[in-house]
Image (spheres, helix red, strand yellow):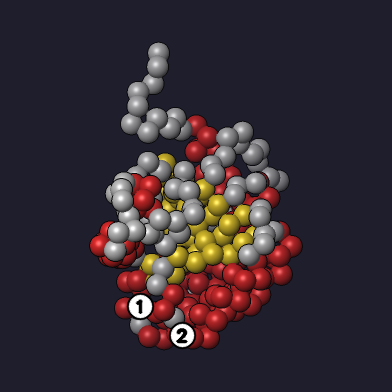
Amino acid sequence: MRKTVPDRLPTHVAIIMDGNGRWAKQKKLRRVEGHKVGIDSVREITETACDLGIPYLTLYAFSKENWSRPKEEVKTLMSLLGLYLELEVPMMMEKGIRFNIIGERSDFSRSLQSQFDNVMKQTAGNRNLVLTIALSYSGRKEIIRAVRLMCEDVKNGLVKRIDERAFKRYLYGPDLPDPDFLIRTSGEMRLSNFLLWQVAYTEIYVTDILWPDFREQAFLEALGEFAKRERRFGNIKEY
């Protein structure tokens, strides 16, 4: 039975999906099995967020550093990514979910890049949820890339004022609001180079649950914790 939905929900939830490998190890399975079951969690959390009316969900799926993993594991992850894109489009269309990507898309094969483009094109008119997947993503590289692009436009006289609003236009997802809530599974207490600029005032929630086991009830519990938080953005509470 679904637990009570909190009265106050975040506008943008970001999730560091961690623990697929440990989940598989605990069950004496190959790491790939953890990744496969992790896709089921992606589907369930995405559908739940959409059903709750949360307009933005960003999932950290593959970091720039993940390319250094064993070649066979990377190859399997790329295959699973392609399969996910193929199978989930009907659900996205039914639920009104728009697919989006942040990260270095050029790092992927041409066939995967073509899939990215096709899914984004197919779902471009959907309005219920923006599902953003971070792929070959690095928060530091995103900031450096933004600085380089902005410097070029300053040099060419296209930027007259340098401030946070102007800088944000050069990030991977300039139209995405900053996350209100960041969830990390598997108990690790670090950001892992994820959305370093955007999470300046984001509420952070860490759970020991491994990603393949993080489903609707765990998500609702996390959202319940968010509802209890008092967001002051550096101000003080009035007494």
Determine the residue located farthest toward the right in the rendered image.
94
Horizontal relation, residue 225 to residue 96: left or right: left
Residue 206 shows in this picture:
yes
Question: Considering only vertical position in the picture, is 166 above or below 135?
Answer: above
Q: Position of residue 94 (x, y in %)?
A: 74, 62
Instruction: Judge by depth and name the residue closer to the eye, 44 or 13.
Output: 13
Q: Position of residue 106 (x, y in %)?
A: 41, 79
Instruction: Judge by depth and name the residue closer to the eye, 69 or 33.
Output: 69
Q: Position of residue 209 (x, y in %)?
A: 47, 54
Identified at 35% across, 23% down, the residue is: 236
Instruction: Specify the quadrant that holds the C terminus.
Output: top left
Q: Quadrant of residue 64?
A: bottom left
Three-letter amino acid code of the residue under disc 2: Ser
The residue to which callout 2 is attached is: 109
Identified at 49% across, 54% down, the residue is: 175
Between circles 1 and 2, the one closer to the viewer is: 2
Query: Secondary structure under badge 1?
Result: helix
Say if mark 1 contacts mark 2, CB within 8 Å: no
The residue to which callout 1 is attached is: 67
Q: Which callout, 1 or 2, points at the residue further toward the start of the chain?
A: 1
Graded by Cα atoms within 10 Å as few (under 14), some (14 to 19) or many (20 or more), the crowding at tag 1 reads some
Three-letter amino acid code of the residue under disc 1: Trp
